[in-house]
Image (cartoon, rainbow, N blue to C red):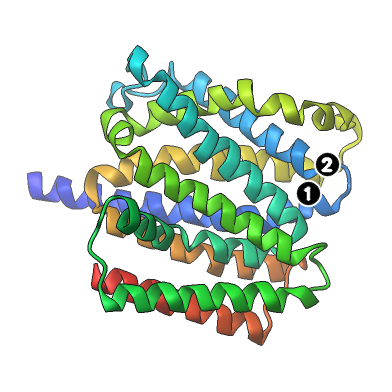
Amino acid sequence: MKQSDNRREVRTAHLALLLANIGWGVIAPVSKMVLLSGAITSLALSGIRITGGALLFIIFTWVLPRSFETRQHIERKDIWKLILCSALIISANQGLYIIGVGLTDPVDSAVMCSLTPVLTMLLAAIFLHFRMTWLKVGGVLMGLAGVLILVAGSAESEIAVNPILGNLLCLGAQLCAAIYYVGFDGIIKKYSPYVLMKWMFFISVLTYVPFCMPDMLKVNYMVLPWDVWAGLVFIITIPTFFGYLMIPFAQRSLKPTVVSAYCYLQPVFAAIVSVMMSVGDFGWIKVLATALIFVGIYFVNKSS
């Protein structure tokens, strides 16, 4: 009976990861659609996303089961660390990403997201002295070559306003996430993932959203088209709230390498939905760049 329960938990964890990464992949074309409407700026969208996510985390604190440790208290000595974590993984990561999506192709932005595990490994090797092998080095260099080709090739995109800057901003967003994973491993393991996300979203509402407020107040919410409203609801609920909510399920039953490997599905779903929504393209240059990045990631994981 116990073995059957464990298998059920593993299957549930895989399903949770799949749904989360589908949401994180689809957020790129949906965000691009919202921004192309001209009714909402990148700053307004990032502020709306963080504010909406914070509200949902606070509301669900009182209805979720105790297994999420929703009432776990943050120690006073960890508050400043939590503020830095919020700046990295919420404000900088989500802010830079949304602004980057507004400037580049949504497929490019999703491919950049797949580099987070490689960037994390590279920073761990530099600052935590994790062992590097020739296979890892080759994988990192191959991934870097793919990024450079992607950035250079996107200069001809018809949809992207400033693809080079947009891709670099999306890459910077993933670098912020990698710094968070490497530099704050202690606090990540100390507290429940749900509790961390709840407080980090709340802190970002106080520290980052005020800078977005002028753009948020300029939005005429009463006349927004239905598809823009649908996009906003999707962005706030699926990739922002439910995506982060599903990760605790996966972390209980699966290895970290398995959890991180699912992010490689994001560009696939981003490409499919982008083409369907006519907000992105996927030419042979992007195919080559994406292939280099994925092979590089495979070498890094193979070595690990």
Residue tagged by mark 2? 40
Residue found 68% across the figure and 27% down from its top: 209
Asked if the residues shown at circle 1 and circle 2 are in contact, with their CB atoms under 8 angstroms apart, the answer is: yes
Image-based side of 12 in relation to 277, left or right: left
Q: Residue 274 at x, y = what percent?
A: 69, 66
Q: Quadrant of residue 95?
A: top right
Residue 23: in sight, yes or no? no
Q: Residue 23 at x, y = what percent?
A: 54, 52
Residue found 39% across the figure and 71% down from its top: 297
Q: Secondary structure at mark 1?
A: helix
Name the amino acid type tagged 1.
Answer: Val
Name the amino acid type tagged 2.
Answer: Ile
Residue tagged by mark 1? 34
Report how far apart the C-alphas of labels 1 and 2 lie in the structure: 7 Å
Viewer-closest of 119 and 106 = 119
Q: Is residue 200 above or below residue 127?
A: above
Residue 192: in sight, yes or no? yes
